[in-house]
Image: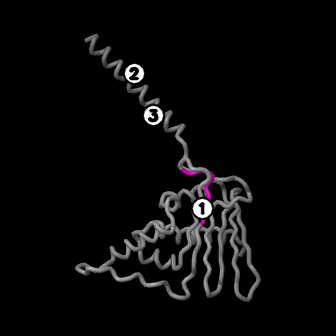
Amino acid sequence: MQRVSLAAGVLLALTGFADQRCAGAAATAEPTFTLASDPAEKVLRVQFAATTAPSYVEWTVYGDGRLEKVESYTSDPVRRSEVKLPTEQVHALVSGAVDQGLADTNHAALSEKVTAGRAALRPKGQRFTPPIPPPPDDAPTSELEIRLASYRGRSPHVVLLRRKGVEGLARDLPMVPELQEWARLAKTLDALVTKEQPK
């Protein structure tokens, strides 16, 4: 009985030691990304440029949490709106983009996913995927910029994407999470600015 008890005690001790090591490792694990805190440093930027009013709209989040919206109309002066976001909210915005793969993509990789998404929508029994129709002439061209102080050991890490018809593609291709998040970011940033403006 003493040998069994001794063995059980050693096992419990080793288990507890392993649990402590795991907990310590989790506590000291490096974050996936870090953000700049410089007020002049861009962290996140989404832009839409169209032929219809507003002809240009851009949302930019800076290192100090400022969210700035700039609208340019063809016949009116530039309009600017600004709010201050808490650090946790900025981190959540960027974390959503990272989780949906935007920090790991580029134009070529995203184009491949769009092509694959179109193929997945091919009618059953059809051998060839129809060509991807171009976006409408009045579809806005969008830019997405993510600037991380560090990302998975790379410092700094910058993503810059440019594509026409992002909103339409996000609607037509739900299987491409990067497009979904890109379109969602624009709506989220606009809502954050709008709700803080005086009525």
User: The residue under label 2 is which amino acid type?
Assistant: Ala
Q: Earlier in the sequence, mark 1 or mark 3?
A: 3
Residue 44: % across, % down: 62, 63
User: The residue under label 1 is which amino acid type?
Assistant: Ile
Mark 2, residue position: 13
Residue 190: % across, % down: 62, 72
Q: Earlier in the sequence, mark 2 or mark 1?
A: 2
Residue located 74% across and 78% down the image:
79
Out of 121 and 18, give the one closest to the viewer.
121
* Outermost residue to the front: 108
Out of 127 and 81, give the one closest to the viewer.
127
Residue 70: % across, % down: 70, 74
Task: Residue 48: name its quadrant.
Answer: bottom right
Which SS class for mark 3? Answer: helix
Q: Which mark is residue 146?
A: 1
Task: Residue 147: name its quadrant.
Answer: bottom right
Is 152 part of what is drawn in magenta? Answer: no
Residue located 37% across and 71% down the image:
116
* Outermost residue to the left: 125
Which SS class for mark 1? Answer: strand
Above or below for 4 versus 109: above
Give the magenta part as a residue range. Answer: 145-151
The alpha-carbon separation of the residues under discs 2 and 3 comes to 14 Å
Q: Are marks 2 and 1 in contact (CB under 8 Å)?
A: no
Q: In the rendered view of the protein, which quadrant contains the C terminus?
A: bottom right
Instruction: Please name which of the two marks, 1 or 3, marks the residue nearer to the observer.
Output: 1
User: The residue under label 3 is which amino acid type?
Assistant: Cys
Above or below for 120 versus 5: below
The alpha-carbon separation of the residues under discs 1 and 3 comes to 32 Å
Residue located 74% across and 57% down the image:
39
